[in-house]
Amino acid sequence: MAAEIIDGKQISADIRAELAEEVKKMKSEHGITPGLAVVLVGEDPASQVYVNNKEKACLEIGFKSIKHVLPAETTEAELLALVDRLNKQEDVHGLLVQLPLPGHINEDRVILSIDPDKDVDGFHPISVGRLAIGVPGFVSCTPAGVIELLKRSGTELEGANAVVVGRSNNVGKPAALLLLDENCTVTICHSRTRDLGAVTRNADVLVAAVGVPELIKGDMVKEGATVIDVGIHRTDNGLVGDVDFEAASKKARAITPVPGGVGPMTIAMLMRNTLKAAELTLGR
Ligand code: NAP
């Protein structure tokens, strides 16, 4: 039987519509418009596209979007001074600095300088620590999107064998922690894993965040598994993921396509984090 295609585009649109309703309520009940500040340093074309998409999503949902575009020669001290100002600015609830930064700026120092209560990217070590010990905090957007896709596609997580292929700080590790939090039995694979297929064939839930085009073949997928493909690669045959979609979809119960799977979820989760950041200020 053909696998159910998990429609990330539709799920992302549903979430953004739900958030827009909550924003309306927040405005009328508390007079607060959630604000997201995005800082871009330099002219990296991909980063420019990401930043513009974030601004567009903010405006659609009813957030205030505050964009700072700085020249590539900006010094680290100048950037840190701007972050400090935005940390203190009351109409800025969420704050992110678009990565990668030019080589002369230390990314870790910049991430550390962001107020953890505004850290909507979830990259600050305090956010990562909160996730690790299971207390509320900001979860980075792509892994949060993976979990949302699993939940909204009706995937049974309690007690499931979940295998995450990839252990990066921004996708693999947080995805594994989130799955653990959902009571999955979690295995993390990486480039030194022996016999990857033997591990993935045991996965009820398989998350591929590898960065290698179509590494996960059909015979590496368990019959009836749910497969979430985080990878995205431009090839001569168009965009492909980390999973051989054609072959894997013959085995899986449900699977995300590339494009239109995990990709659209990242911005939706960023918007959700920004609303959460604005809600945090209500409790103060
Ligand atoms: P990354 O930092 O390069 O990490 C890749 C991970 O995969 C590493 O842990 C690596 O292991 C592991 N790996 C590499 N080759 C392997 C192999 N042959 N077998 C098993 N494991 C292997 O990549 P990332 O940032 O996590 O991103 C992964 C993919 O997701 C990329 O295609 C990226 O473009 C995509 N992505 C998409 C979104 C989105 O859609 N919004 C967001 C972020 C990333 P080692 O640790 O041992 O090196």
Image (spheres, rainbow, N blue to C red):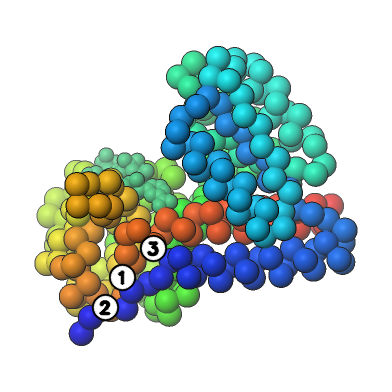
Q: Classify mark 1: helix, strand or loop.
A: strand
Mark number for residue 261?
3
Residue plotted at (24% across, 75% down): 252
- Tell me if 61 is positioned left or right of 31 in this view: left
* Relative vertical location of residue 223 with respect to residue 29 in this rendering, above or below: below
Question: What kind of element bears circle 2?
Answer: loop
- Image mark for residue 3: 2
Residue reaching furthest bottom? 1
Q: Is mark 3 within 8 Å of ligand 1?
A: yes
Q: Nearer the viewer, residue 266 or 236?
A: 236
Which of the 4 quarters of the picture holds residue 94?
top right
> Total number of numbered labels?
3
In the image, residue 125 sits, relative to residue 83, either above or below, namely below
Q: Position of residue 151 (x, y in %)?
A: 46, 73
Q: Amino acid at mark 1?
A: Ile
Q: Write the residue at 49% across / 41% down.
A: 49
The residue under label 1 is 255
Image mark for residue 17? none
The amino acid sitting under disc 3 is Gly
What secondary structure is marked by label 3? loop
Nearer-N-terminus badge (1/3): 1
Labels 2 and 3: the sequence-earlier one: 2
Q: Are the residues at dot 2 and dot 1 in contact (C-beta closer than 8 Å)?
A: yes
